[in-house]
Image (cartoon, grey):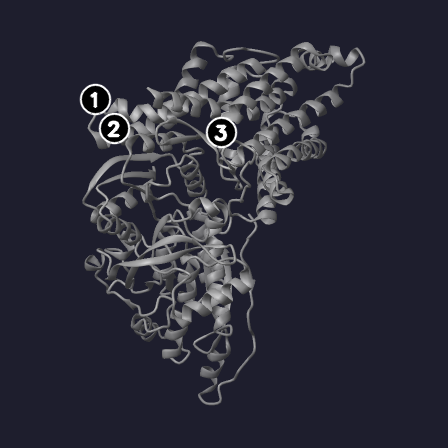
């Protein structure tokens, strides 16, 4: 039973990381109707910058903190260079152009940092030395850092919710999503609003990358795997909905972790061990997508249809 | 698609042979052309880089000559796409008229290019990939290996687990062909109980689920094959979860290509190899020293095998006195396998794959703070792969 608790913690921690990346993606998709495949690149850059600055400054936390403004600036630059010209285009052009951004940035990363995974400084200052942890189950230490991620992953969504639902800027964003022409007519610079939303999303993704850098390998292409799951998250949660993205991210994280842990064992009840392992492994990696298909069947707009969801 | 391959003209000094006819002299002055094929972009690029640098270091050691003839290396990135590999290699064969093809990190890339190369009667030296088919029924007079057959390192680890007396082993591998081959190789020599076998997707991001299961199973040791970034992550999580007291037996998971990122976390973890940077023979010591001076990182098995490939070709061309047109003579010369290897003595089996020793190695920290694998003890002596017997060469 305690093992199940650990697996649930694993899922929760993976889920909140997914949320941090998916939130920005969902905002950009929902508010600006822009399919940004290059969002994963922002996540990757966040991790790289945090890793490099962490080693440079000698503190993981300083590196992670500095990664946020860098990600913001890169987001602004990319918006100005590429994405600004895509808002009025159809989705196919957006997919093509942002895919091009992925190839360019990943190849540039490889040229700058090389293709081998980066060394990341262990986050220090947590109880029990650099790799401190809590022994939840006998013989298994649960790293404190992962608990910190869960904590951050609960605070950030609350802040985001407050920002979008309770502030004037958030009100403009919501209005801009549903009635862009009207907001523009009232004298709000919708272009600048979009730029700010985009850069904010990029910063969130960069922050997620920085947070993930000590636990996932920092290598070119690390954003691609996350991006696919993030699209699953925003499709399940409902495009443009922060609340939907949060719930869907936790759902995907839990399904993934618990599915991988339990399915092979469950299948062993009906199949022989070796085929249970094989089918269990295959089924566990499909589980998230099966659930997504089922949710879309009953709720085509996702769990919490928001904004301009088509 | 732009061709990423580029020519590295190494030497063009025309040293006219004092003796011999005019045509002979001209043939001798032209450089020997070698196409190096490796994965140099995408997630597998780190291995391709090791392989390429190993080859270039070998050529450099030989004064940019193979068997006394100037050499020109054409570096080809296969991009880990079979169609790209085939079309680039075809171009090298037909347009650039290369005399040899060397390299190849991944088995599926080797399988893609093996027929186009060998059917054009060009020698192909694999410096890493060694799929069972090409060591057995699909062997070719034009295919040679300076590395090993894929099963051998896994079988070595199986034997090591057996020798170390581990009764219960937990297996964790990625869910694809090479992962399944690793399990088969390990089990071919390990006779104890396998507590559980877990197959994870190749795109696995996080191992916390598996680490939790390992902690629950409390095995005597784990065996894993997690190449590249997968291995970086597994090693770090394994260490963080406090499981390092359970011996970590692995293949292609902790080596010089991943150790810079794994660092302390991989300390004392085990791997199986044909060679390690601490090998104590003159050829090996010189290789490690020159390689590190030139490229700034510790060479891996990949680099060592490519370095050996250069010496293998050098010895053979020297035997034919610089003639690379007489294929039969060249084949006999290559089969002799009497080149100075960083692994010490080495000979080739009937299928052109090396018959060699395999070692249990352990990750250690050097005095200069860099990490490398170091030999612990010899596990298999003069081991020939199990497919050589089914190889019938024409």
**Residue B261 relative to residue B341: left or right:** right
Residue under disc 2 on the same chain as residue under disc 3:
yes
**Label 2: element kind:** helix
Q: Which chain carries label 3?
A: A
Disc 1 vs disc 3: which is toward the camera?
A: 3
**Label 1: element kind:** loop
Q: Alpha-carbon distance for marks 2 and 3? A: 34 Å
- Name which quarter of the figure residue A40 lies in: top right
Is residue A50 shown to the viewer in this render? yes
Q: Which of B161 and B122 is in front in this view?
A: B161
**Label 3: element kind:** helix
Residue tagged 2? A276
Residue A245 position in % (x across, y down)? 54, 17
Residue tagged 3? A144
Q: Which chain carries label 1?
A: A
Residue B9 position in % (x across, y down)? 56, 68
């Amino acid at each position: 039973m305690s093992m199940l608790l650990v697996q649930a913690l694993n899922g929760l921690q993976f889920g909140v990381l997914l949320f941090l990346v998916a939130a920005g993606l969902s905002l950009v998709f929902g508010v600006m109707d822009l399919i940004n495949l290059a969002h994963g690149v922002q996540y990757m850059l966040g991790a790289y910058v945090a890793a490099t600055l962490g080693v440079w400054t000698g503190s993981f936390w300083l590196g992670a903190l500095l990664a946020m403004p860098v990600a913001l600036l890169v987001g602004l630059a990319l918006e100005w260079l590429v994405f600004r010209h895509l808002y009025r285009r159809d989705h196919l052009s957006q997919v093509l152009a942002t895919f091009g951004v992925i190839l360019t940035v990943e190849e540039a990363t490889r040229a700058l940092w090389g293709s081998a995974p980066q060394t990341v400084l262990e986050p220090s200052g947590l109880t029990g030395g650099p790799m401190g942890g809590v022994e939840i189950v006998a013989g298994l230490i649960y790293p404190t850092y992962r608990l910190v991620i869960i904590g951050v992953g609960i605070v950030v969504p609350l802040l985001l919710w407050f920002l979008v639902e309770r502030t004037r800027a958030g009100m403009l964003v919501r209005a801009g999503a549903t009635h862009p022409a009207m907001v523009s007519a009232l004298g709000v610079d919708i272009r600048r609003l979009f730029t700010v939303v985009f850069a904010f999303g990029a910063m969130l993704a960069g922050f997620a990358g920085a947070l993930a850098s000590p636990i996932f390998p920092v290598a070119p292409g690390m954003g691609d795997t996350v991006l696919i799951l993030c699209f699953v998250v925003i499709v399940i949660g409902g495009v443009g909905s922060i609340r939907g993205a949060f719930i869907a991210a936790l759902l995907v994280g839990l399904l993934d972790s618990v599915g991988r842990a339990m399915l092979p064992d469950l299948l062993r009840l009906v199949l022989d061990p070796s085929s249970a392992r094989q089918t269990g492994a295959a089924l566990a990696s499909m589980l998230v997508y099966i659930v997504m298909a089922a949710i879309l069947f009953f709720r085509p707009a996702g769990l919490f249809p928001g904004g301009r969801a088509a | 698609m732009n061709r990423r391959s580029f020519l590295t003209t190494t030497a063009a000094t025309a040293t006219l042979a004092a003796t011999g006819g005019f045509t002979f002299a001209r043939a001798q002055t032209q450089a020997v052309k070698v196409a190096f094929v490796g994965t140099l972009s995408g997630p597998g690029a780190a291995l391709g880089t090791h392989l390429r640098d190993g080859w270039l270091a070998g050529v450099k050691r030989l004064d940019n000559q193979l068997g006394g003839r100037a050499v020109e290396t054409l570096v080809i990135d296969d991009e880990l796409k079979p169609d790209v590999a085939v079309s680039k290699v075809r171009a090298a064969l037909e347009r650039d008229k290369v005399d040899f093809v060397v390299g190849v990190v991944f088995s599926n890339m080797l399988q893609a290019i093996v027929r186009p190369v060998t059917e054009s009667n060009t020698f192909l030296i694999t410096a890493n990939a060694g799929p069972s088919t090409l060591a057995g029924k699909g062997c070719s007079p034009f295919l040679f290996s300076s590395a090993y057959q894929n099963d051998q390192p896994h079988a070595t680890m199986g034997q090591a687990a057996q020798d170390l007396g581990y009764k219960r082993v937990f297996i964790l591998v990625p869910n694809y062909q090479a992962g399944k081959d690793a399990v088969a190789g390990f089990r071919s020599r390990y006779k104890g109980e396998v507590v559980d076998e877990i197959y994870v997707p190749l795109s696995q991001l996080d191992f916390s689920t598996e680490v939790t299961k390992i902690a629950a199973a409390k095995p005597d040791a784990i065996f894993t094959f997690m190449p590249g970034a997968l291995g970086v992550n597994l090693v770090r999580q394994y260490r963080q979860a406090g499981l390092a007291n359970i011996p970590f037996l692995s293949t292609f998971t902790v080596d010089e290509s991943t150790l810079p990122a794994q660092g302390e976390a991989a300390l004392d973890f085990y791997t199986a190899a044909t060679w390690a940077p601490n090998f104590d023979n003159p050829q090996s010591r010189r290789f490690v020293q020159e390689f590190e001076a030139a490229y700034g990182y510790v060479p891996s098995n990949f680099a060592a095998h490519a370095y050996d490939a250069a010496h293998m070709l050098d010895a053979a061309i020297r035997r034919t006195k610089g003639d690379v047109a007489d294929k039969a003579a060249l084949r006999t010369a290559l089969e002799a396998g009497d080149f100075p290897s960083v692994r010490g003595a080495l000979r080739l089996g009937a299928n052109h794959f090396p018959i060699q020793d395999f070692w249990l190695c352990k990750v250690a920290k050097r005095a200069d703070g860099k990490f490398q694998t170091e030999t612990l003890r010899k596990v298999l002596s003069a081991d020939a792969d199990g497919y050589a017997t089914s190889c019938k060469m024409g």
